[in-house]
Amino acid sequence: MESINNLFLKCYKDKRVLVTGHTGFKGAWLSLWLLELEAKVAGFSIDVPTEPSAFEAMELSHRLQDFRGDVRRMKELRSIFKEFRPQIIFHLAAQPFVRESLREPKRTIETNVMGTVNVLECVRESSIVEAVVIITSDQCYENVDCEWGYREIDRLGGDDPQKASKTCSELICQAYSRSYFGAEGSTAIATARAGYVIGGGDWAKHRLVPDCIKAWYDREVPVINHPEYRCPWQHVFEPLSGYLWLGALLTNQRSDLNGESFNFGSEPSSVRSVEELIESLIARLSKGRWVRAQSEDIYSEPIYRLNCEKALNQLQWVSVLSYDDMVDKTVEWYKQFYKGGTDMYSTGRQQIMDYVRMAAEKKLAWTFGKEYEKRSRRRAAGGE
Ligand SMILES: NC(=O)c1ccc[n+]([C@@H]2O[C@H](COP(=O)([O-])OP(=O)(O)OC[C@H]3O[C@@H](n4cnc5c(N)ncnc54)[C@H](O)[C@@H]3O)[C@@H](O)[C@H]2O)c1
């Protein structure tokens, strides 16, 4: 994949990159992308969380170093750090579900909070980690029904154990970044916040797209809560391009980003109601119907819109796909999977290449390669 090698300042080529949560929805796609960038990838996860899964469908286990372990156990993490000696880390391993967190608050907090602490302790013990990107959530903000979008300087909060754990994770990163990291030439860390992520290969329960897709292929009818809710949907490649770009900049030249947090979200034009998204899926699949829930779901969530101007101003990052492109890509992946006999790694790889091509047409900074560095130097010297 020639053109793709110029991406992200070429910083991932031959780098040892550890992805925690690599068997999950986002982690699997991130691992595939890193492999295409010619990184040496290791993954660390407790299990493969769903059946089917993007991780297994794209046959990732034999393409990377596939470790099983628990982020709550320092000993297990430490031994991976010893064996693999990561230079860049993307920490995605988490218990991400609100319902589950209400059932199991202790496990959620231990996984999301102490898991982050353990990763950062291993980083502190290592002398070779260059960059760490900690993935938290759009839900780390205190819910004030902010219609114009939460900004990174807005107050954090957490009305349930899952949200509180992600908020704690943010605060811990801030403390570690200020206390231990960020000196010239040493490790730099940053956090990334995103939500309403859709894309092929998600089969998590109680998420809209997987619930519908699974129901339709099982000839069932999904029951939908709050079809009127309007959400800022985004394709999984959008936040992943943000994570990769953040990792590349932390590694390369931007120690000023140490301790910073970034929102990664879609354009306002991607905001659609739940009902509109379901109808878009049905139109493309040419199958499926749904029914409205009779009673209100006790788990109904507030909507978190993100303001992404900081990512635009400081990273020159914006989202790439239109609403239609996002739904097309999502449905195409599931169609290929359920058809059977398709090489899903190639399908995934092709989808990433198409996304990269569209990003390059938009002249996004992460596609410039060395050109970005030259421009940054010119800008720093006052030439632009
Ligand atoms: N998907 C979304 O819409 C969304 C929205 C906001 C934030 N996030 C965040 O992004 C990250 C990835 O989300 P996802 O959708 O891929 O989640 P997922 O549930 O698909 O994957 C979670 C991953 O974490 C691993 N894991 C869980 N507990 C672990 C433990 N104790 N030790 C080691 N590994 C463990 C699982 O094995 C899996 O690989 C999470 O931090 C999540 O909170 C996701």
Image: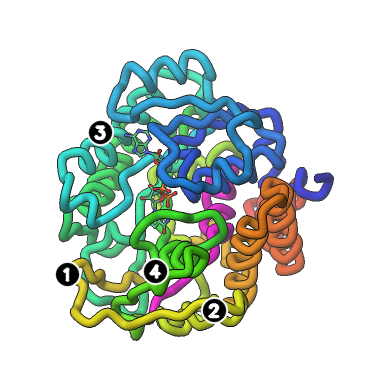
Residue matched to label 2: 282
Name which of mark 4 and mark 1 comes first in the sequence.
1
Q: CA distance from mark 4 to mark 3?
A: 26 Å
User: Disc 3 to disc 2, how far (Cα)?
Assistant: 41 Å
Type of residue at label 3? Met
Amino acid on which disc 1 is placed? Ile
Label 4 – label 1 distance at C-alpha = 24 Å
Comparing 236 with 295, the one in front is 295
Q: Secondary structure at mark 4?
A: loop
Image spot of residue 210 (x, y percent): 45, 62
Disc 3: which residue: 114
Dot 3 surroundings within 10 Å: few (below 14), some, or many (20 or more)?
Answer: many
Report helix, strand or loop for mark 3.
helix
Q: Which mark is residue 285?
A: none
Residue corresponding to mark 4 = 306
Q: Position of residue 33 (x, y in %)?
A: 64, 45
- The C terminus sits in image quarter: bottom right
**At x 67% / y 62%, what residue is drawn?**
364
Where residue 309 appears, as percent x and y from the top left, is 47, 68
